[in-house]
Structure formats: structure tokens, C-alpha cells
Amino acid sequence: MPNSSSVSEFLLLAFADTRELQLLHFGLFLGIYLAALLGNGLILTAVACDHRLHTPMYFFLLNLALLDMGCISTTLPKAMANALWDTRAISYLGCAAQLFFVAFLVGAEYSLLTVMSYDRYVAICKPLHYGSLVGSRACAQMAAAAWGSGFLNAVLHTATTFSLPLCQGNAVDQFFCEIPQILKLSCSGSDYLKEVRLLVVSACLAFGCFVFIVVSYVLIFRVVLKIPSEQGRHKAFSTCLPHLAVVSLFVFTAVFAHLKPPSISSPSLDFVVSFLYSVVPPAVNPLIYSMRNQELKDAVRKLYGYMLLRNQ
């Protein structure tokens, strides 16, 4: 078996044996990828161009769209290329870079979702203090903290994971380089436990953020239910419930993917769980945040109308 010094590349998960199924996987991934880029790109452009959307909520949504585009661009293009060219190979440095960016962007996105729950809590529960608690400087600091925490998370996990000696081959049973799959190739018990402990610490921090998010929304719902206007209640629920649904899917699938016991691990289960936290949120977030947000829909329509006039 090779050790880490002799591993020059890894072999990612093969989706199918027949050429027709490989091309089908390529087409499905391409459709999801283009839809995610289009949806998040529209949000970015609409928020940047419409001065009415220059508010804290849309500032955080712009950051979320950036993270979503980065996250899905880290995983799917390589999987599409492998399916199209009938190969499984990814270089050692390419694998390390992919793992780093996935950990960075996923960690930053979760931190940002926590910040967004705080933003909604202040906006609905403490509206009179919203300007002072969530001003432009506070927004910039919270966004920077979210990106910085993701970067620190990625550096720690990537350095620890790729310092492990590898002696269990180079086949990664996943469509991208993921920490649990690299750990399966390790042959060092003490170093392996070091990364597992780091994963547990990250999971505990993630659980703490999740508790904060849930408590924030419990307080929000208590206030919303007291709103006499049915339209006001509907608007508040329409912005909060989708956010909570995305966070729940994101957290539970990511934690399960990294901390599930090896006894219940299988290539198909691992693929589905990782797909749910790395591909589904970036693809559906634009739909969730735009379809239930009239201001954003109006901005997109205005942008579309401007583009039509310009092309005439």
C-alpha cells in the first residue's frame, strides 16, 4: 500500500460504468450548476444595482450568494469533468485545495446563516434598536467574522487531515475530497484521533450556533404571532421559515456526514448526505430567498426590464 509520500493523486467516486449513465450524470450536474450560478448571480446583481436593497438583510444575502457560488463551484465542475472524460483522478494538491475550499466556504456559510438569524431577530423583536445594533459597521464586522471563521476552520482541518500518513490506498469514495473519506485512508491512530477530536469540537460549535438560531426564531415567532395584521405575520413567516428550513438541512446533513459511525457508512449513503449539504443549499437558496421576497422579485424584474431595453 502506498504511504502519503508516494500518493500523487486520488481517485474520486465513479458514478457509473456505462458511458450513457456517465453522460446523464454530467447533464444533471451541469443543469444544477448552471441553475445555481444563474440564481445566485441574479441575487448578486439585483442587490448590487438596486439602492433600495442596500440594507443589512440584503447585504448578508449578497454574501450568502457569493458563498453558494463558491461552494458549488468547488465540487461540481471536477465531478462533471470526470464524468465527461471518463476519469476519476484528482491530483494530491487539487484534492487538498478542494478540501480546503469546501471547509472554508461551508464553515463561512454556516456562520453567516447564524448572523442572518440574529439580523432577523433584531429586525422583528427589537425594531427600534435595529439601526444601532445592525449598522453598516456592525454588518461589515459580522460578515468579516463569518468569512474569517470559515478560513480558520479550513486551515485547521486541511493541515491536520493532510498531515496524516496514508496507507489505505488512494480511492476516495465521494465525488469530491471530503475529510471523512481522507481519514479512511489514514494508518496513524494518534493523528487520526487528533482530526476526529477537531471534528467533534467543530460539531459542538456548530450545535451551539444551531441552538442560537433556534432560540432566535422561537423569540421571533412569539413576536410574530402577536402581530394583529395577517399580512404582517405572513411577511415575517415567509422570510423566517425558509431560512430555518435551509439551516436545518444544512446542519444535520453536514454533521451526519462527518460524524456518522463507520458501521453505517456506504458509498450511496455518503454520496446522498454530502450532496444534500454541499450542492442542494447553493442550488435552492436563490429560490427560497427570492420566491418569498417581493422586494427581491421586483428588483430582478426591474433588472430584467432594463436589460431588455438596453438590447433593443
Image (cartoon, grey):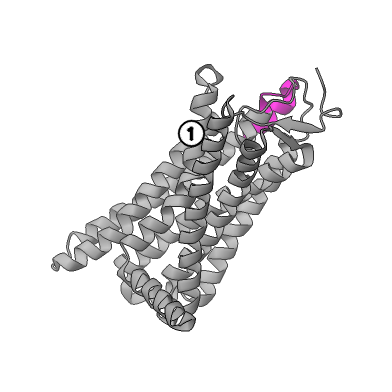
Asked whether 238 falls inside the magenta stretch, the response is: no
Across and down, in percent, residue 12 comes to 66, 31
| 200 or 18: nearer the viewer | 18
Q: Is residue 187 above or below residue 83?
A: above
Between 207 and 40, the residue placed more toward the observer is: 40
In the rendered image, is residue 42 in sight? yes
Q: Residue at x 21, y 62 (%)?
A: 234
Farthest residue, direction right: 5
Horizontal side of 198 relative to 31 (left or right) equals right
Q: Quadrant of residue 293?
A: bottom left
Is residue 256 among what the camera can see? no
| The magenta segment | 183-197
203 displayed left or right of 231:
right
Q: Position of residue 63 (x, y in %)?
A: 52, 63
Q: Name the residue rendered at 66%, 24% in the picture.
A: 184
Instruction: Check residue 192 for magenta coloring.
Output: yes
Figure label count: 1
Q: Which residue is mark 1?
A: 273
Q: Secondary structure at mark 1?
A: helix
On the rendered structure, is 208 left or right of 201? Answer: left
- Residue 269 percent across, percent down from the top left: 49, 26
Q: Position of residue 248 (x, y in %)?
A: 39, 44
Q: Residue at 60% of width from left, 35% of height from top?
A: 175
Q: Is residue 266 above or below residue 283?
A: above
Q: Nearer the viewer, residue 76 or 230?
A: 76
Q: Quadrant of the C terminus?
A: bottom left
Could you tell whether 258 is left or right of 285 in the image? Answer: right
How crowded pointer 1 is (Cα within 10 Å; few <14, some 14-19, many 20+) is rated as some
Residue at point 40% right, 71% down? Answer: 300
Give the dominant element type of the magenta stretch: helix, strand or loop: helix
Q: Is residue 25 above or below residue 218?
A: above
Q: Please state which amino acid type lies under the numbered disc 1.
A: Val
